[in-house]
Amino acid sequence: MADLAGLPDKRWSVRGLTDEGDEAWVIRGISRKLYRCPSCHGEIEIGSEHVIVQYVFRLGGTEHHHWHRRCAEEILIPELREARRVPAGESAQSKLEQRGRKPSGRRPRR
Ligand SMILES: [Zn+2]
């Protein structure tokens, strides 16, 4: 896990699996509106660097949330299984939504 320190950043995202076996992609973002962090329920101010967590569900479909970086580092990322870094280009929202259109059994393996 040590090599995930400071991630996600502009070049790297983090990908792991939840306990339920869904994919969680953790991506650096800049907020364009006010968000509320699901972990601490505090506000994420407009224009601030934070992380976006996009789930790609095993059975298809996606969902994303905006987290404070610190909350994600302390709570979210340590809970992920097989967490590793992936090039940020692979975590583009459009690609992940595409990925969510197929159940994981039919998804190409990376
Ligand atoms: Zn938070």
Image (cartoon, grey):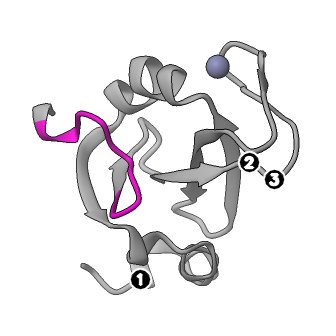
* Left or right side of 102 for 19: left
Is label 3 in a helix, a strand or a loop? Answer: loop
Tell how many labels. Answer: 3
Between marks 1 and 3 in the image, the one whose residue lies nearer the viewer: 3
- Confirm whether the magenta stretch covers residue 69: no
Label 3 sits on what residue type? Arg
Which residue is tagged 2?
31
* Coordinates of residue 33 in the picture (x, y in percent): 87, 47
* Coordinates of residue 74 in the picture (x, y in percent): 41, 17
* Left or right side of 9 for 72: right
The region drawn magenta spans 3-12
The residue at the point 40 percent across, 26 percent down is 73
Label 1 sits on what residue type? Arg
Q: Are marks 3 and 2 in contact (CB under 8 Å)?
A: yes
Q: CA distance from mark 3 to mark 2?
A: 4 Å
Q: CA distance from mark 1 to mark 3?
A: 31 Å
* Coordinates of residue 57 in the picture (x, y in percent): 57, 59
- Looking at mark 2, is its residue's CB closer than 8 Å to ligand 1? no
Which residue is tagged 3?
32
Residue 67 in the image: above or below residue 8? above
If the image is split into quadrants, where does the C terminus sit? bottom left
Depth order, front residue of 74/22: 74
Q: CA distance from mark 2 to mark 1?
A: 30 Å
If the image is split into quadrants, where does the N terminus sit? top left
Which residue is tagged 1?
107
- Confirm whether the magenta stretch covers residue 4: yes
Residue 1 in the image: above or below residue 93? above
* Left or right side of 19 for 85: left
